[in-house]
């Protein structure tokens, strides 16, 4: 993979977007002329072009992710090349990873390997490093390489962990304090009396926890096949499932054995610092009900509401803010223009540059709701400050060859939790159709 390949995909995105704009302008003109058949024909063409944009934009993101991963691997190799040799701990980790791969492939004779993995884990602890494996009902911590690959793929399939605040905690009782401000001040002369001023208050947030798991299975024949890369297959399967479940939970999780999602508490119109304050888990929403002439917003999004939501968000949070929406909403927003006929949406036409909407990056989050009655399809804010995701226990894996004879199942899990952190740091747009 080369940088030229990334550049070619970027050019494809730009060309497709230019065609999209021309076609949409023709469609609008046809509607004004009352030529519904022509407009319908152009709608079909728009759908095709939109598919092309998504395809090439996806290829662009994949190539950039691959390029970043290659760069990271090169940096690691260069760093190791500058060392006189591996440390004892490096050797232990390398041997552990090899034994772990052997353990995955083993069928019915894993007791010896489990003992060896445990011994290597003890050696690692003796080196005063983080435990890289420990027995727990037949389960082992996933080696660093596989865990890192799963996390990398998760970022490819979902923007969750690249947007929100993620912390590693040592207990499920973890709590975090959020400042509600409230301090007051005043002016006084040199000899004037000083009255007590208001003191800022704090709010405590406690994430709700659950266990996120995947349970892929593979036939024993496949494990016998020397050409079958079970580690890569496992990483891909787990990453896709984790990305789907985590993305859904962070948006709409009900807090029952899972994170409490952003929209679990319905957003309200109450502004920041209004009295009484909004509920701790309730964000503010901006209505996108009607256009300036009073007619229903079409296609469900009032263009001005995109501007309104930016400036409803406190300026302290705008730096680092981004949009979140799913692909269906993205397609609708792409058609919105200013009164001068300029499209609000601008595709990323440089390597590493995301798509931009009114100067802020757009993250495609497929678990966001669609445009519809009383839905909240668009979010805007500083998600790093708006939502907290906590990892209680890192990735762990248990090999199960008993439940389904002839197949080996891999029970991979991670205990985690989540909660709204600062409900002033993000806003949502509500639609009515």
Image (cartoon, helix red, strand yellow):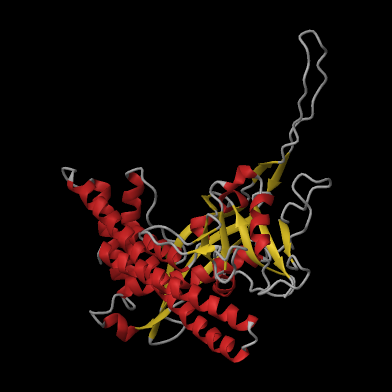
Residue at 77% from the left image edge and 59% from the top image edge = 268
Q: Quadrant of residue 335?
A: bottom right
Relative vertical location of residue 89 with respect to residue 338 in this rendering, above or below: above
- The image shows residue 134 at horizontal and vertical percentages of 41, 57
Query: Quick check: 323 above or below 399?
Result: above
The C terminus is located in which quarter? bottom right
Q: Position of residue 159 (x, y in %)?
A: 50, 62
Placement of the N terminus among the 4 image quadrants: bottom left
Percent position of residue 173, x then y: 63, 50
Q: Residue furthest top?
A: 191
Residue 66 lies, in percent from the top left, at 32, 64
The answer to whether 336 appears left or right of 104 in the picture is right
In the picture as drawn, the residue positioned furthest to the front comes out as 33
Residue 155 quadrant: bottom left
Farthest residue to the bottom: give it. 37
Residue 167 seen? yes
In this rendering, the count of numbered labels is 0
Tell me if 193 is positioned left or right of 430 in this view: right
The reply, left or right, for residue 406 in relation to residue 253 is left
The residue lying toward the viewer, choosing from 229 and 420, is: 420
């Amino acid at each position: 993979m080369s940088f030229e390949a990334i550049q070619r995909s970027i050019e494809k995105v730009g060309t497709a977007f230019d065609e999209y704009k021309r076609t949409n302008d023709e469609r609008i003109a046809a509607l004004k002329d009352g030529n519904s058949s022509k407009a319908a024909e152009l709608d079909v063409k728009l759908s095709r072009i939109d598919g092309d944009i998504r395809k090439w934009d996806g290829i662009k993101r994949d190539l950039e992710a691959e390029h970043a991963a290659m760069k990271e691997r090169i940096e690691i190799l260069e760093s190791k090349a500058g060392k006189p040799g591996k440390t004892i701990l490096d050797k232990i980790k390398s041997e552990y990873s090899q034994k772990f791969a052997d353990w995955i492939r083993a069928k019915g004779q894993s007791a010896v390997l489990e003992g060896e993995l445990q011994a290597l884990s003890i050696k690692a602890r003796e080196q005063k490093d983080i435990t890289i494996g420990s027995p727990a009902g037949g389960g082992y911590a996933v080696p660093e390489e596989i865990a890192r690959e799963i996390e990398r793929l998760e970022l490819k399939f979902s923007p969750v962990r690249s947007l929100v605040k993620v912390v590693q905690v040592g207990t499920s009782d973890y709590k975090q304090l959020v400042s509600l401000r409230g301090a007051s001040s005043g002016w006084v002369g040199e000899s004037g009396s000083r009255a007590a001023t208001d003191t800022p208050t704090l709010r405590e947030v406690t994430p709700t926890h659950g266990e996120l798991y995947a349970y892929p299975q593979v036939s024993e024949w496949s494990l016998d096949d020397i050409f079958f890369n079970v580690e890569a297959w496992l990483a891909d399967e787990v990453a896709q499932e984790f990305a789907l479940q985590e993305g859904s939970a962070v948006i709409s999780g009900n807090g029952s054995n899972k994170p409490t999602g952003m929209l679990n508490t319905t957003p309200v119109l109450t502004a920041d610092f209004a009295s009484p304050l909004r509920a701790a888990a309730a964000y503010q929403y901006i209505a996108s009900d009607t256009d300036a002439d009073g007619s229903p917003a079409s296609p469900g999004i009032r263009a001005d509401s995109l501007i309104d939501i930016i400036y409803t968000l406190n300026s302290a949070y705008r730096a680092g803010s981004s949009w979140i929406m799913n692909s269906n909403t993205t397609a609708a927003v792409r058609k919105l223009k200013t009164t001068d006929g300029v499209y609000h949406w601008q595709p990323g036409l440089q390597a590493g540059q995301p798509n931009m909407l009114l100067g802020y990056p757009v993250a495609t989050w497929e678990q966001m709701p669609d445009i519809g009655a009383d839905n909240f399809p668009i979010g805007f804010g500083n998600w790093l400050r708006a939502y907290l995701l906590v990892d209680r226990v890192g990735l762990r894996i248990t090999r199960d060859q008993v439940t389904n004879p002839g197949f080996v199942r891999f029970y991979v899990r991670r205990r985690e939790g989540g909660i709204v952190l600062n409900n002033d740091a993000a806003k949502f747009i509500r639609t009515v159709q």
